[in-house]
Image: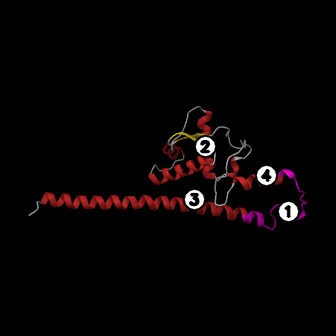
Amino acid sequence: MPSVVGLLEQHELAARRRVDGLREEADRIQAELAAAELEWQEWTIARRRVDTVLAPDGGATAEVEVTADPRDAQVQAALQDAAKPKSQVPMWRQGVAWSVLSVDYQRILVALADRARLYQGPLTCQEMAVAFGLDVVPAKVEALRSKAKRLVARGWLAERQPGRFTLAAGVSGPGDGS
């Protein structure tokens, strides 16, 4: 016959495994929720932009004569090259302004630009979460890491040490476009 302590340990172990499994599932769901919220925010912004463009009094464009400017064609071609389909982050190149990025990406760049300006060195995703006032939980940190890695892949950031991000060479303060 098993001892009472042995039975308690078995039940405790089973409960611990269930808690661990539920925590993993909660973290996965929280990460999925964060991604869905980001997508929802981006669609909301897109809808507002379309509403602004299609508004009947949106700048009285009907009375303005539009003339072709060769620079406009160059900018359009650069943006088409920069932003691939389904890409939220265009490739960085000289002259591309930070304003082409969504607010979340700009926020990361601003934080890193401030660090660079103050000669404070690279920033980890956990430090970013704290700086942005987010809960330092795996889902939030991983969402930031995903964004930072995307910025690295597109040339906006550098990751010279694993998990430590800085502005890439040539990328400077917001609004400079370079």
Q: Earlier in the sequence, mark 4 or mark 2?
A: 4
Against 157, is 80 above or below? below
Label 3: state its secondary structure: helix
Furthest residue to the left? 1
Query: Does the segment drawn in magenta span residue 10?
Result: no
Classed neighbour count for the residue bearing mark 3: other residues with Cα under 10 Å, few (<14), some (14–19), many (≥20): some
Which range of residues does the magenta coloring cover? 50-71
Mark nearest the camera among 2 and 1 is 2
Q: Amino acid at mark 2?
A: Leu
Q: CA distance from mark 3 to mark 4?
A: 27 Å
The residue carrying pointer 4 sits among few (fewer than 14), some (14 to 19) or many (20 or more) residues within 10 Å by Cα, namely few
Indicate the secondary structure of the residue bearing disc 2.
Answer: strand
Which circle's residue, 3 or 1, is located before the other in the chain?
A: 3
Q: Which residue is mark 4?
A: 75
**Badge 3 is on which residue?**
38
25 lies left or right of 176: left
State the residue at coordinates (75%, 51%): 78
Mark 2 lies on residue: 157
Quarter-of-image position of residue 48: bottom right
Rendered image quadrant of residue 5: bottom left
Residue 176, position as x, y percentages in the image: 72, 41
Cα–Cα span, label 4 and label 2? 23 Å
What whole-number distance in Å separates the C-alpha atoms at marks 2 and 1? 38 Å
CA gap between label 2 and label 3 equals: 21 Å
In the image, residue 172 lies at what x, y percent?
A: 67, 39
Residue at which label 1 appears? 61
Mark 1 and mark 3 in contact (Cβ < 8 Å)?
Answer: no
